[in-house]
Structures are given as structure tokens and as C-alpha cells.
Amino acid sequence: MAKKKTNKNIPLPILILICTVLLFAMYLSLSTLALAIWGDSVMGTVDSYDSRLDDTDAGQNRSRTVSKGYWFLVNGKEYRGYVIYSSDEAWPSLTEGETRSERIRYLSFLPYVNKPAMLCEFSEMGEVAIIYHILAPIGSLLLLLLVIRTARRGKKKKPAARKPAAFQIIEQRSDTYMFCPNCGNKITKGMAFCSSCGTKIQTNAPGVCTACGATLPEGAEFCIGCGKAVNSATSEPMEPHHVATPAPPQSGAGLVGFSDRYNCPEILAVPHRKTKNSPLAVCGYWCSCRSSAFPSPVC
């Protein structure tokens, strides 16, 4: 049974929550460092306070959870603040209408960023807290980049377009053109005919005649070997047509075995004679046979 592919995408609500927590952690550390370096101090009023014991065996400043609400005036304008932090501080809770004074640190150009002085002064925080507030923004930023990168990787990629099967077959069988299809002799690129059996290999080889395989010069319209037209649009050259002319009548002079005296009365009278030993009775071409280089065997 095929295993189902797990979806590695981070749900959007969880992604937003993770990014919000990391950004808030960066804000807390950076604002604390900014108040310690550039902050101004003013006396404020604490109007709500609560201290809850969590663990008696915890480390320093980790046994209680303290929540505090306060307000202060800057340039005649009231600003409020609220903090929750871990500490060993165990002040008594305030009753209704009761207040307590405490020094508040704020940014002069942005008083909305403020904290109690004991939480943002280097002399009060200690070395461990200072190192934490320096490294916390860097770690939160790296985690934020990692989460964003993971969310981008989780997106489905579009499937790549596949090549047609025909092109794949041609690519796989392209090596068959390196051998002669008739005798199997190995041939090199550019050969028009097989060197072993003479079979035509390429029908449209550039610069090669398709009829005889001769190399064609550049711009030639006809083959220099067989005269065939290179371009199919070019008409074939016309071969000269020889018209047979009748030979002029010639006399019998100069002809072997023939004489123009065959109509002589003496020749015509020979067949009527009954002389057997007469040479003219045997051969009607007596005057011709005697003067011929190839006389008749009966003469």
C-alpha cells in the first residue's frame, strides 16, 4: 500500500502566531536596550501591584511573578504602562485607592516606550540580563527567517512540462545514424554514400550532390560531376538531339564486292549460258571479286 505524502505546509494561523511571538520578543529586548542607553527618568505613580509566589526553590529573581501598573507625566501629558516580570520582590498588594511612587524610564522622542527603571538600567539588570537582551533579538531574527523560508518551501511547485514521447525516441535512437542501414559499416558525419556498399546515406547533405555524391561549389545550380540540378526549381539541362540525315547516294566505286557494271549486257547474258566452267557462271560479280581484297570463296 502506497504511503500518503505528508503535507509540510505550516497553517496560516500558526504561522502568524509564531511570527508575532518572535517579533514581540525582539521588541522587548530592543526596547530595554534603547531605554538603558537613550532613556530619560521621571518619577511615576504605581496604582496596581500583584506578586504571586510560583516556586520557592527557583533561582534568583525566578520565584515570583510580579505584575505592575503605573502612570507618569511628560510635558504635561499623562502616559500609562503595564509590565509583568519574574522577580523575588514581595511587596504587599495595594488596596483600592492606594498608590506607590517609583522611578520610570522612557524615550523622550517616544514616551509610549517606557518601563520601570529597575528593569532597564544596566546597574539593576546584571550581566546575565544584559547578555540575554543582546542575544535575544539576533536569535529571534534568525528563527523568524527560518520560519519564513520553511513556509515558502512548503508551497507546491508546478510540475515541469514533459517532453513529447516522439522527441524522446529520436534522442534515444540518434546513434543509429552512425552506421550504414544496408551493410552496418561505420560511417562519419557528412558522408553521402557508404564507403563499403555505396548505399546513399544522406539525401539532403549540404554541399553534396544527391545523385552522384560529388562536392558542389558554393552557389552552384548544377552538379559538376553528373550535371543534375541542385535545386528542384531549376530545370534540367537539355541534351543536344542529333537528327539523322540521309546519306548522299554514292556510286559503287570503292565498295567491296559490288560493281556498278551489273547491268552490262555481257553480265546479264551469262545466266543464259550453260557453260559450267565459266567464272561468270559461278559468280555474277566477276569483275568485282577479282579486284576485291576479300573475294568470294567460289571464285
Image (cartoon, helix red, strand yellow):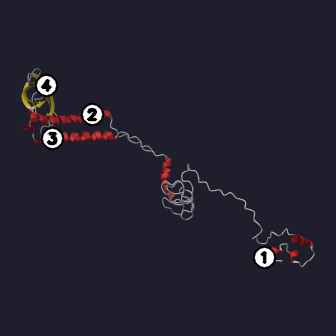
For residue 52, say whether it is visible.
Answer: no
Q: Eyeballing the image, is 127 above or below 214?
A: above
The residue tagged 2 is 17
Amino acid tagged 1: Ser
Upstream in the sequence, badge 2 or badge 3? 2
Task: Mark 4 and mark 3 in contact? Answer it, CB < 8 Å.
Answer: no
Question: Could you tell me which residue is drawn at 88 percent across and 72 percent down?
Answer: 266
Taking the spot 90% from the left edge, 71% from the top edge, the residue there is 269
Please identify the quarter of the rendering in which residue 8 is found: top left
Q: Residue at x 78, y 76 (%)?
A: 291
Q: Position of residue 1 (x, y in %)?
A: 46, 45
Disc 2 versus disc 1: nearer the observer: 1
Q: Amino acid at mark 2?
A: Leu
Q: CA distance from mark 2 to mark 1?
A: 136 Å
Q: Are marks 2 and 1 in contact (CB under 8 Å)?
A: no
Q: Which residue is mark 4?
A: 80
Residue occupied by mark 3 = 134
Distance from the alpha carbon under mark 2 to that under mark 3: 23 Å
Mark 2 and mark 3 residues within 8 Å of each other at the beta carbon: no
Residue 202 in the image: x percent, y percent? 53, 56
What quarter of the picture does the C terminus occupy? bottom right
In the displayed structure image, the side of residue 62 where residue 233 appears, left or right: right
Tag 4 secondary structure: strand
Residue 84 image point, x, y percent = 16, 31
Residue pointed to by mark 1: 291
| The residue positioned farthest toward the front in the image shown | 265
First in sequence: mark 2 vs mark 1:
2
Which quadrant holds residue 110? Answer: top left
Q: Amino acid at mark 4?
A: Arg
Number of numbered discs overlaid on the protein picture:
4
Residue in the foreground of this view, choosing between 192 and 73: 192
